[in-house]
Amino acid sequence: MTRAGVPFLWLCGPPGVGKSAVGYEIFMQVYRSGIKAGFLDFDQVGLCYPAPADDPVNHRVKAQNLAAVWPTYRAAGARCLIAVGSVTSRETVLLYAGKVPGTDLTLCRLRATPERLTERVFRRGLGRGPVVPGPPPTASKQRLAAMAADAIREAAEMDAADFADLCIDTDEQKVTRVAQQIRARTGGWPRLTP
């Protein structure tokens, strides 16, 4: 899934796996090293609901917003892009990748056990986790259980499809360690050419 060009790292995985936290940590590590980087959370740029029936997750809106934001980041001097967001098929990845010509995409799937996903969904849903775009906190254990079941189902779909360039487990690991592992396993991402 790579093309010659600007490094583009996309972290995907089910809700609660740690995409946003790990992606932002990588962004911080990269920019602190002196490399100008862009960061994009697809959930944030896709908040346009109700979504059409044939695109319930708003992938087309998110991909179009990626296409609009990336040239602005480049004009501001960004030398790489980190993005986070769920995706469950290679075809959908190609929809996004087609919107950012001249990039070299590395798709990294984050994985967690069903127990860990459930714990994180409940923690976030009860307002005890990081603030992320999406539904407001709820005290409904039934609603949280349904959200956790959806996350576990999505994780199983991703395991079966196995279309990412690499997969990193997030269970029992701190965000900084997961970020370091991703960068190490991608040869020190971003590998920039002069």
Image (tube, rainbow, N blue to C red):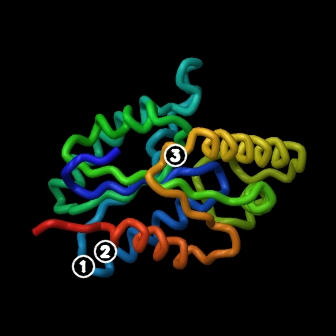
Location of residue 114 in the rendering, given as x and y in whole percent from the top left corner:
77, 55
* Residue 34: numbered disc: 1
Label 2: element kind = helix
* 156, above or below 53, in the image: below
Residue placed at 63% from the left, 57% from the top?
Answer: 111
* 42, above or below 30, in the image: above
The N terminus, quarter of image: top left
Which picture quadrant has residue 37?
bottom left
Residue placed at 44% from the left, 44% from the top?
Answer: 45
Alpha-carbon span between mark 2 and mark 1: 5 Å
Location of residue 84 in the rendering, given as x and y in whole percent from the top left corner:
47, 53
Alpha-carbon span between mark 3 and mark 1: 27 Å
Badge 1 crowding class, 10 Å Cα cut-off, few under 14, some 14 to 19, many 20 or more, is few
Q: Which residue is mark 3?
A: 43
The residue closer to the viewer here, 94 or 162, is 162
* 60, above or below 2, in the image: above
Label 1: element kind = loop
Tag 3: residue type?
Asp
Badge 2 crowding class, 10 Å Cα cut-off, few under 14, some 14 to 19, many 20 or more, is some
Q: Which residue is mark 2?
A: 31
Tag 2: residue type?
Tyr
The residue closer to the viewer here, 137 or 96, is 96
Do residues under tags 2 and 1 come within 8 Å of each other at their CB atoms?
A: yes
Location of residue 18 in the rendering, given as x and y in whole percent from the top left corner:
60, 62
Instruction: Give the mark toward the camera: 3 or 1.
Output: 1
